[in-house]
Each structure stands twice: as C-alpha cells, then as structure tokens.
Image (cartoon, rainbow, N blue to C red):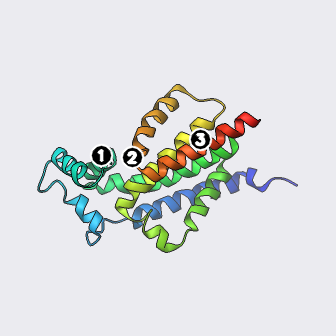
Amino acid sequence: MPNIFTNQYVKIAMLCSIAIILLLISLYLKLNLANADDHFFFTATQQSTVINFLEYRYENWTGRIPIEAITILTIQYSFVWKFIAPFCLLLIAISISRIVCNKIILFYVFLSLLLMLAMPYAVGINTVLWLTGVYFYILPLSLCFYTMSVFVAKRQRKIEIVLSFIFTFYFSYMEQIAIFFIFICAVWLFLQKDL
C-alpha cells in the first residue's frame, strides 16, 4: 500500500493549507490599542527616546532589553509583526520536524502547525494573536526551538551555529523559555550519554 503522504497532490494540499493558515493568522493579527501592553509599547517613543525608555524599563521593571527594543522599534510597522507571527509559528513547526526526524518533513511541519492551532481560543488570543505576546513569547520560543533543532542535529552548518549562538542570547531574556531550553538540553545530553 503506497504511503499517502508521499503523493504529490497531498504534499501540494499540505503546502497550500500551511500557506492559507499562515495568511489567515497574518490577516487576523491586529494592533489592539485597548490592550494595555500593545498601547504601552506603541506609544513608548512618543514621550521618550528608545534608549531612555529602555533605561527606564530596566531600572523600574525588567531586564528584557533586547525583546523590548525590538518591540518598540517595530510595533509601529504592521507589515513587520504581520510577518513575524506566522513566521514564528512556521519556524516552530519546522524546528519540531528537525528535532523529531533530524530533517524537515512536510507532514510533520503540517501536523505540528495543526496541533498548535488546536490550542483553546483563549490561549491563542493571548499568545499568537496578542501582538505583544508575539514579541515576548512566540518570537523567543520560536528561536529557542530553532536553536534546539540545531543543537540536536547530526550535522550543522556554520551559519546555523552562529545564528543559534546569537538567538540564545535573545531568547534567554525570557526566563521560562531559557529554563525550558536548559532542561531540554540537559535531558538530551543525558540521553546521548546513555546511548
């Protein structure tokens, strides 16, 4: 019996479905100025310079300077965040395929994306469809998954190693994701030792 997922029509259908899903996410994502966080970062540079704002935030609230810098520098431009949110989901799905199969397999990318979309609406609206949630959670998480996929790969290209090194400094500003990364790397190293 032939494997249905090797059929070209099925592959085309999966690719089209992925494209439609990512396009719909991009179209649905909107800046919500009624949301305190979206409004706060959207108006951050109206009363202050970027450097002064980041200095104030560091002294009074958080040390997530790279994450907040990217947020306030790009939140004014809808084309940027309308690209970032779906790209991050796709990067997570691709990275999951690389981690599980040690290569990118379209079926696993498609399945990973579908499973992410199966999350309850209340969770999705507060992460993927919440603009500052994309910057503060989804972007660092996608870079973490990408870095893990490079870390566990049998072969890595030099550019992937360099990017992963840079991304590690970025996503480590999100403490929960940094702890997740350390835990997964420790488990992976432990399992490799036993093999």
Name the residue tied to disc 1.
65
Disc with the residue nearer the chain's start (1 vs 2): 1
Split into 4 quadrants, where in the image is the C terminus?
top right
Q: Residue at x 44, y 49 (%)?
A: 140
Q: Residue at x 50, y 55 (%)?
A: 89
- Within 10 Å of disc 3 (Cα), the crowding (few <14, some 14-19, many 20+) is some
Front residue (pair 25, 91): 91
- Residues under numbered marks 2 and 3 in contact, where contact means CB atoms less than 8 Å apart: no
The relative height of residue 98 versus residue 42 in the rendered view (above or below) is above
Q: Amino acid at mark 3?
A: Cys
- Residues under numbered marks 1 and 2 in contact, where contact means CB atoms less than 8 Å apart: yes
Q: CA distance from mark 1 to mark 2?
A: 8 Å
Front residue (pair 27, 46): 46
Q: Amino acid at mark 1?
A: Ile
Residue 173, label in figure: 2
Q: Horizontal and vertical percent for residue 26?
A: 42, 61
Residue 185, label in figure: 3
The relative height of residue 35 versus residue 26 in the rendered view (above or below) is below
